[in-house]
Amino acid sequence: MANTASAKKMVRKIARRTAINKSRRSRVRTFIKKVDVAVAAGDSGKAREALVKAESEMMRAVTKGIIHKNTASRKISRMSARVKTLSA
């Protein structure tokens, strides 16, 4: 348990930040899921559109420190490859 005033304040700050980060991470996962659903349905137009939005959202998460840059790049690359197979 936090004893000092500054430690108690840090506990409050960490709780707020955790809630914000959880929300952002959930938002990224939602956009990724939209790409996966579109790919599974075989809808290339919808998949491309969802990919653009997902890529933007993932890079925003990188700037906020939610996910690592290489992780985002890897996931975007794999999603792009799946979307590309639909249009081919």
Image: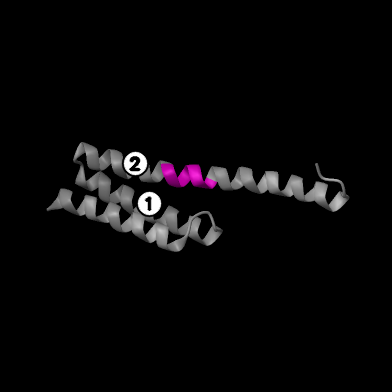
Q: Dot 1: what SS?
A: helix
Examine the image and state in which quarter residue 72 appears.
Answer: bottom left
- Which quadrant of the structure image shows residue 35? top left
Residue 83, magenta (yes or no): no
Structure colour scheme: one colour
Q: What residue is shown at x 19% (from left), y 54% (from top)?
A: 84
User: Which residue is disc 1 drawn over?
Assistant: 53
Taking the spot 26% from the left edge, 51% from the top edge, the residue there is 48
Count residues near mark 1 (Cα–Cα under 10 Å), then give few for <14, some for 14-19, many for 20+. Answer: some
Left or right: 58, with 23 as reference point = left
Predominant secondary structure in magenta?
Answer: helix
According to the picture, the residue beneath numbered tag 2 turns out to be 34
Q: Earlier in the sequence, mark 2 or mark 1?
A: 2
Within-10-Å neighbours for mark 2: few <14, some 14–19, many 20+: some
Residue 32 pos. (x, y %): 37, 45
Magenta range is 24-29
